[in-house]
Image (cartoon, rainbow, N blue to C red):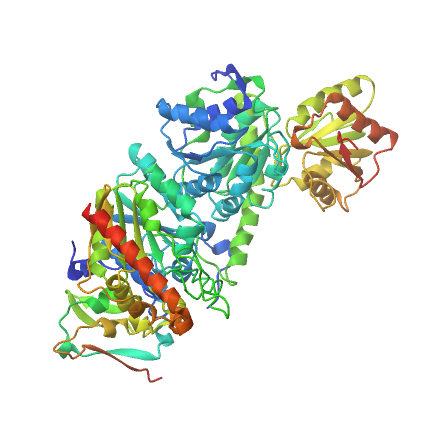
Amino acid sequence: MMAGITKIDLARTGNEAMAYAMKQVNPDVVAAYPITPATEIVQLFAQYVADGEVDTEYVPVESEHSAMSACIGSSAAGARTMTGTSSQGLALMYEMCYIAAGLRLPIVMADVNRALSAPINIHCDHSDTMGMRDAGWIHIFSENAQEAYDNMLQAVRIAEHESVRLPVLVTTDGFIISHGMERVATLPDDEVKKFIGPFKPGTMLLDVAKPITVGALNFTDFYFEHRRALVDAQAASVAVIKQVGREFGQKYGTAYDCIEPYQLADAEYAIVALGSTCGTAKVVIDQLRAGGVKAGMLKIRVFRPFPAAEIAAALAGKKSVAVLDRSDVLGGFGGPVFTEVRSALYQKPNAPLLADYIYGLGGREIDMEMIGSVFAQLQDGTAKPDSVQYLGVRD
Amino acid sequence: MSLKKYQDLALGGNIERGGTAVDFKTGDWRSLKPVYKPENCIHCLFCWAYCPDSAVHVADGKMAGFDLDHCKGCGICAHECPGKKGAKAIVMEPEVK
Amino acid sequence: MATLKELAARGDKFTGGHRACAGCGATIAARQALLAAGKHKVVAGCATGCLEVVSTIFPYTAWNVPFIHSAFENAAATVSGVEAAYQSLKRQGRITENIKFIAFGGDGGTYDIGIQSLSGAMERGHDMLYICYNNQAYMNTGIQRSSATPRGCNTTTSPAGRKIPGKAQFRKDLTEIMAAHNIPYVAQCVIGNWSDFTRKVEKALDKGGAAFINILQPCRLGWGYKPELTAELGRLAVETCFWPLYEVEDGVYKLNATPKDKKPITDWLFQQERFRHLKQPANGAIVDEIQREVDQRWERLVRKCDG
């Protein structure tokens, strides 16, 4: 804890932590639609509005598609804009999410990871947000409610940075984080205000003296150039994500980066994971370490832009590595995290043996014993290179 | 015209000025052109009101000729023209290239 | 209401140099709407479709007001977001200008794929005017049927074939659906009556709150007629009572034009290629059906306006 900044510890669910971060950000506009398990974010925020605790214009839209459409209009108008959703709601938004990124609008969205239908299911997996991986958004995973809170504040800074100007998706895991009660350290309102600073829009339709056109039609002569510019914006965001994460640490005690190694430096056997599973895995690793096994983990916090070089460097020299994928790429070769990590390692020296474990679909429990079994397979050689296995399914 | 590199384009593909379409000429689409007969004009401005291409000039509230850079020759102006005593103030004639 | 001289003095906010067909009615609607709105500061939006495509081919834009297009089915939601931003920044004292908001959408983007977004925005009561430039089919993609396409009409997805003579269904009445939202202002207009349209646009903006205008827009390509007839065919739709001009202000219906001599629907139908097949004697029953339907809708509307 830095001098002069008082953190207030409160018992909060992940949803409460995200809604509270949104309240402190005090965005100009929130357009949102309720969906399990993210509904609380929307309803808590509506209460803040009803109680006059924020300056926000709250737009209670009739669908998630309209939520993102209204966010696009609002952000392009020159207003700081936020929203929240989950699962089918995010899937309904996909079309507009691509457009939000293409128009370079710094919208911040809270997403509670939930499985996609069919069959319909309200519990956690990462299928919904993994559908966003080509949309052009910056994509941050949270391990717990504390990270969700911290990530939401940092997301505003990252999205709005003049070299970035991209939308940011901050996720928690459905029910595991969204509804689990934790102690969350929150910053005072004025500290949040200072940290995020005032919004300086890059596009402002409400500047009527300057009649810009947003969303013009591109033929073959300009489309490619405009898409290429997005690549640069994603690349430029890496330094900003790191700088904002460092500054957050200097000011408030916990620094953030794109990846977070845990007991990884001297590890022989490692897992790669995202989100709430990392918390469980840390306990398993501590136990294995106590028993003399050199176990470790690479947690990926930022999935977009994908920190390929950092991941390759962090995993170099390990004997074998298991990727834990909480979603699948049907008809592909392994889950989305596996395919990206494997690409990152290709033709790199000292690349480890890499196996994929798809787990936890539709909220299927992942416990310490299951993570322990993955480490056991890494050690005894039953984890075959380039294999894709399903962990915890009845077969 | 050399087109801009991607680094030099405006944020988000925005067009940063309004009304830049005037720089694009559509006059060469025409096969018929409007010809103004001021002696038959009552300056009702129907030609101006119904022109899809903003190609009728108005000055001081009066019909003041055509913007042939943008007129596509649709003939709405001539059709809508009430003229004077049955004689049109706008007639369409074949475009001579 | 403003005279044409007064409108001309306001200056065009929708320029030439766009790529619409010669004689396009959609661009007449956009131009006249922005002229009518000219005493206000305006931000406009448009659904994907003919109007958006012809007017914003990068780096050329025909819009001389701030303009946004995002997608097809969501012009209302997108502009509602712009309006929400305005309300927020205005309340916080971060902008001082008074601004009005207009969204445009074709019948495809309004009657069909955009009706949910439109209904939502109107129900929420944003201070915005939505103008549907209704040319009765998906013209931008090559004349496919929409729920605004009239019965018997030949389109590329309701073709007049050897067995089926064009579209089987009657058109949806979106103006009445919007009136049922109990918003402050709903109106029907037509290309070909500039004074009625510009008066209604001004009225909608001056009233404030959510407003909807459905303007019937002849399309020379999709309807099949000579380009100079765009305004004429609009007026004929009114004179046959196919497309009555009326407004619903705070729930009160008012007819704006009653034809002295109601013309038979064939006067309108048979000037258009899209109904040409209905001239065949075998299709006479369909023409009769269309006439009956026009008559019934007209009588219902007159009763509402008298009531």
Q: Give the image quarter of residue C136.
A: bottom left
Query: In x, y percent, where is residue C27?
Result: 33, 62
Q: Residue at x 45, y 34 (%)?
A: A32
Quarter of the image holding residue A235? top right
Left or right of A169 on screen, residue C181 = left
| Residue A91: % across, % down | 55, 41
Which residue: 36% across, 84% down?
A: B97
Observer able to see residue B51:
no
Specify the farthest residue to the bottom. Answer: B96
The image shows residue A41 at horizontal and vertical percentages of 48, 27
* Residue at 32% over, 62% down: C291
Q: Is residue A279 above or below residue B49?
A: above
Task: Using the rendered view, name the quadrant where residue C54 is placed.
Answer: bottom left
C212 vs A146, nearest the viewer = C212
Position above or below: A90 against A43: below
**Quadrant location of the C terminus of chain C in the rendered image:** top left
User: Residue C191, how many percent across, how many down?
Assistant: 28, 62
On the picture, is A378 further left or further right than C79? right
Tell how many labels.
0
User: On the picture, is A114 further left or further right than C300?
Assistant: right
- Evaluate whether residue A332 shows in this view: yes
